[in-house]
Image: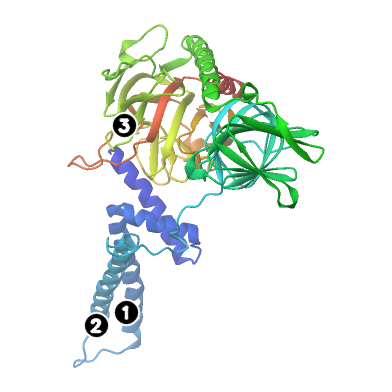
Amino acid sequence: MTAGDHETDDRFEELDDLLLAGREGALDDEARTRLNELLRSSEPARERFVDLQAMTLALELEDGAESATTAVPVTAKSESPRRRGRWLVALAVALGVLVATRWLFLEATRSEPSPSEPRSLTREDSETTATGVAIVTRLVDVGWAGDGPTFELGDAIPPGRVAIASGFAQVEFFCGATVVLEGPAELDVESATSARFLAGRLRAKVPPAARGFEIHVGDMTVVDLGTDFGLSVSPESADVQVFDGEVEVHGPEGAVERVLGGNAVRRADGRLAKAELDPERFVNIAGLDERERRRTRAGYERWLEHSQSLRRHPRLIAYYTFDDLEPWQRTLPSSVIPENGELGGAIVGARHVAGRWPGKGALEFKRPGDRVKVHVPGEFSSLTLACWVRIDSLDRWYNSLFLTDRYEQGEPHWQILDTGQLFFSVRAKAVAGRGPVHRKIVSKPFWDASMSGEWLHLATTFDAETGRVTHYLDGETIHSELLPDDLLPRTTRIGTASIGNWAAPTKPDAEFAVRNLNGRIDELALFAAVLDEDDIREMYEHGKP
């Protein structure tokens, strides 16, 4: 049986469960949506649906025909009720197939309107939304205030408080204004065009397109007219420093004063007076960029030192750092020490790009053919799979991290579902018979579109002794589950596999399941052991960008 057959069996099993739930009236909205997706994406599933519908209808009508033969006497001049019943069964089955086929056609085309018609949105097919009026674009040595929210790089910021105890945070408002906070500082984001500054220092860069951006400070408002300015707020006073362009300072009772570039004013004791310009007190975007370069260089060197020790781990099977690759290089070396050239991967399609830090390499997987082919010989018991990945989108049903080509007995599959859930399975049975051949271990959703482009550390451990599978995100456990004994293989193997894709054709004409990752990978490690949570957290802490 081929890997394609195994996958078809899995889809049929899910389809049968959904159809049974439908016949019993237990199909909720989520299950109905999943049934529609399954039927749209798989021609064998559609054929099986029609066959099952026809079979069910035939059995129901055949029972009715059998009952009719005992209730109606047969005469020489009358047509046989049994024959008439069978003729009605055949007609009804044909009509049932027609109805089922028509339903499939409508479902398949429902989400694909003609180019000339606007797409109509329904509750099940609605536009993705997000919340926020600004975005975090840079964090340098930030310590968040203990009683406030925390943000990651790339997070959208909704209206509300942003408070840092130390370090620097760059926030870009949707209107186009950029603000650099220097901790300790507290900013209350009000909208895409305004904020209230409560304490600390900030520097704002407001291009002409964002002219009119407002920052409220106590009882005054600073209205930008296209400029570069700084604010320093303490309990005693508020300084407005204009480095370029001009701002309007609106005081209480409607008083307005324009401050031109090269000038500063201070409000204290209810009065506004000239102040000394001191641009060195305020970090600008260029200065923050230099600080970040020093920090990222230190982060890269910290990872490199930890990576050198990891390469000598006694249970390390294969280790791909994606580092020190030339743009023309189409072989991905394994960094296990002692060196084993047989573990080198063949880069197919995937493009060389930047990794977690400037100067660190990664591979980008975008097209359906992009992958790295590897061959890992040997048999193992327990496994740990760990990688650093940047997900751009989850636009496949399954999005591959590391998949064995054929998925035979004892072979693992590690991927991400389109729902943002981490997925692991290991095949326990060589041949499908009665019952499933594996248990799918799926985490809670950990990813959504707002995290696009963010580097994440993912890890999954499989304990062949106890059957426990544990999923990790950024060094923390997000799901743990036991495999049942009848689905617990004691021996695992990898053989030929693919990083970032699935290589097994599903049909004789070389069609293949599209499972390529849409994103980047810049480190992947396989261990013949279960690493504990402290080990995995250490990998994350030493590798986080």
Q: Which residue is mark 1?
A: 65
Residue 124 quadrant:
bottom left
Q: Hey, what amino acid is under mark 2?
A: Arg
Residue at 27 percent of width and 17 percent of height: 329
Please report contact status of discs 3 and 1: CB closer than 8 Å, yes or no.
Answer: no
Q: Is residue 322 left or right of residue 298?
A: left
- Residue 164 or 56: which is nearer the viewer? 164
Label 1 sits on a secondary structure element that is: helix
- Residue 90 picture location, percent across and down: 24, 74
Comes first in the chain, label 2 or label 3: 2
**Label 1: few (<14), some (14–19) or many (≥20) C-alpha neighbours in 10 Å:** many
From this viewpoint, is residue 410 visible? no
Residue at 39 percent of width and 41 percent of height: 398
Label 2 sits on a secondary structure element that is: helix
Q: Looking at the rendering, in which quadrant would you find the N terminus?
A: top left
- Residue 44 picture location, percent across and down: 28, 53
- Residue 466 or 205: which is nearer the viewer? 205
**Label 3: few (<14), some (14–19) or many (≥20) C-alpha neighbours in 10 Å:** many
Residue 172 quadrant:
top right
Q: Which residue is mark 3?
A: 405
As displayed, is residue 240 above or below residue 342? below
Please report contact status of discs 2 and 1: CB closer than 8 Å, yes or no.
Answer: yes
- Residue 66 or 104: which is nearer the viewer? 104
Residue at 32 percent of width and 67 percent of height: 103
**Label 2: few (<14), some (14–19) or many (≥20) C-alpha neighbours in 10 Å:** some
Q: Is residue 400 left or right of residue 455?
A: left
Please report contact status of discs 2 and 3: CB closer than 8 Å, yes or no.
Answer: no
Q: Which residue is mark 2?
A: 84
Q: Is residue 154 left or right of residue 338?
A: right
Q: Hey, what amino acid is under mark 1?
A: Ala
From this viewpoint, is residue 386 visible? yes
Comes first in the chain, label 2 or label 1: 1
